[in-house]
Amino acid sequence: MAPSLRASSFSRALLLLLALSVALAPAPAAATGVFRVRRKFPRHGGAGEAEEHLAALRRHDGRRHGRLLGAVDLPLGGVGLPTETGLYFSRIEIGAPPKGYYVQVDTGSDILWINCIRCDGCPTRSGLGIELTQYDPAGSGSTVGCDQEFCAATNGGVPPPCSSESPCQFRITYGDGSSTTGFYVTDLLQYDRASGNGQTTPSNATVTFGCGAQLGGDLGSDSQALDGILGFGQSNSSVLSQLAAARKVPKIFAHCLDTVRGGGIFAIGDVVQPKVKTTPLVPNMPHYNVNLEGISVGGATLQLPTNTFDSGENKGTIIDSGTTLAYLPEEVHKTLMAAVFNKKQDMNFRNYQDFLCFQFSGSVDDGFPIITFSFEGDLTLNVYPHDYLFQNGNDFYCVGFLNGGLQTKDGKNMVLLGDLVLSNKLVVYNLENQVIGWTDYNCSSSIKIKDDMTGFIYTVDAHNISSGWRFQWHKSLVLLLVTTIWSYLMF
């Protein structure tokens, strides 16, 4: 349940600022409020490992889209919406005293969800080289009952059919056959609060999250296992929504992930610099759906049927940072590829794990066109050749745009824009105004965020605090969670 406000005081509002940095090696246990965020899949595969690299990307997105497009919520006293673990994961601390858990940071899911002690089918080790920890609700946590407001809220506003003494349960069955079952608990989320310029003070907030008691299917696999998921979706059950309801943070967040230099920024707050143009979110949709109006290649607009990008059931366009690549309807994909390679008629192509691949020497940015997506509100998104062409071995490239119909039949008419097109851009999700926007940006620089209550503007840098770290298999990011207090007055 979202924490309630006490009538005897004004709210305490916090601005969450999270700075990411490339981590080169595993660190000792982090202090309270420091999250270690790591990328699960490297951006490019090396020679000799291209086939497995591309297959891993396809498997990841295939599992994920089964969950995005085919998720079925079977409420047994409540509903949660966790999805497949994605590209980035973080270490958070929960409880008193706090314990650390590795969770996916994901804009495509809603609840914070962690495997519980004595979980049936939950992995006990991970191929990511991290130590997994199962949450024990008998510590400082408390179980959410069936009669509590949070339980009704996750069940479409209707109290679930169970007794008031029963815990608020959830069961989710996904399109790929995976499933998770558990119950909701309330405990303390630990973080640091900025108390001065460059100074922080430990703090915490009460949040309600899912306690996973049973896993089935690929969710129980050891290979890419994590302790859970930290969702940044729109629903009232998300941690962001709970903190915003308690007037601790605004319901606005942004990310900027630099896949060229490493590092970046993740912030909760009102970004005032750089200025970001926005497009409306499609109302009453569970994901970050937007209205795509057209696609151009090298400045020339693709000729497509007028209803190609209409919104509706299993149609429309989703912005999802948890998806690795980008997926287009078959006709759109075919037309796009023809335009991209229009001046490369003599090029020899190879189908590789359903990727279109080819040999090329020289600069891809000089040899191939920019792809531009145009959205409602005159917002555009440029995708550069070095973003949509993956290098897998010496002078061997594959296209990151795939035919969505080959991935899942439910998604054959959908556009799914993932990390492929969101890299090296500042992306702002303003849920208070129901808009999303982005701009090309140097994610190794800084942004400015305004504290709306005090009027102060803070510079948030892309920190690199990890020069002594080494992570064996994957590029790593470090996420420093810092919060800035707005005001606190007692009646």
Image (cartoon, rainbow, N blue to C red):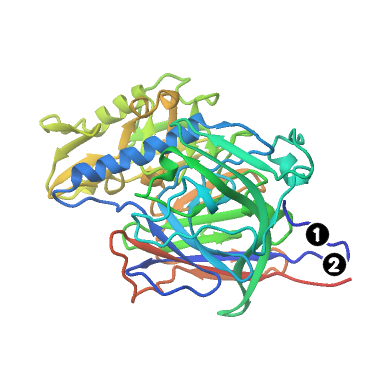
Q: Nearer the viewer, residue 157 or 425?
A: 157
**Residue 489 spot, x, y in % from top left:** 82, 72
Q: State the quadrant of the C terminus.
A: bottom right
Looking at the rendered structure, the secondary structure element under dot 1 is loop
The answer to whether residue 450 is visible is no
The residue that appears at 10% across and 31% down in the rendered structure is 346
**Residue at left offset 18%, top offset 52%:** 46
Residue 103, given in percent of the width and then of the height, sits at: 49, 55
| Residue name at image x 25 percent, y 34 percent | 340
The dot on residue 9 is 2
- Callout 1: 10 Å neighbours few (<14), some, many (20+)? few
Percent x, y of residue 271 = 57, 59
Measured in 3D between alpha carbons, the distance from the residue under mark 1 to the one under mark 2, in whole angstroms, is 8 Å
| Amino acid tagged 1 | Leu
Label total for image? 2
Q: Amino acid at mark 2?
A: Ser
Q: Is residue 170 left or right of residue 383?
A: right
Residue carrying label 1: 5
* Tag 1 near tag 2, CB within 8 Å: yes
Count neighbours of disc 2 (C-alpha within 10 A) and say few if under 14, some if 14 to 19, many if 20 or more: few
Residue 281 sits in quarter: top right
> What is the secondary structure assignment of the residue under circle 2?
loop
- The one nearer the camera, 402 or 177, is 177
Q: Splitting the image into 4 quarters, where does residue 390 fall?
A: top left
**Do we see residue 185 in this rendering?**
yes
In this view of the protein, which residue sits in the foreground, 232 or 400?
232
Q: Is residue 57 above or below residue 424?
A: above
Q: Position of residue 164 (x, y in %)?
A: 79, 42
Q: Is residue 288 left or right of residue 387?
A: right
Tell me what residue is drawn at x 45 percent, y 28 percent.
414
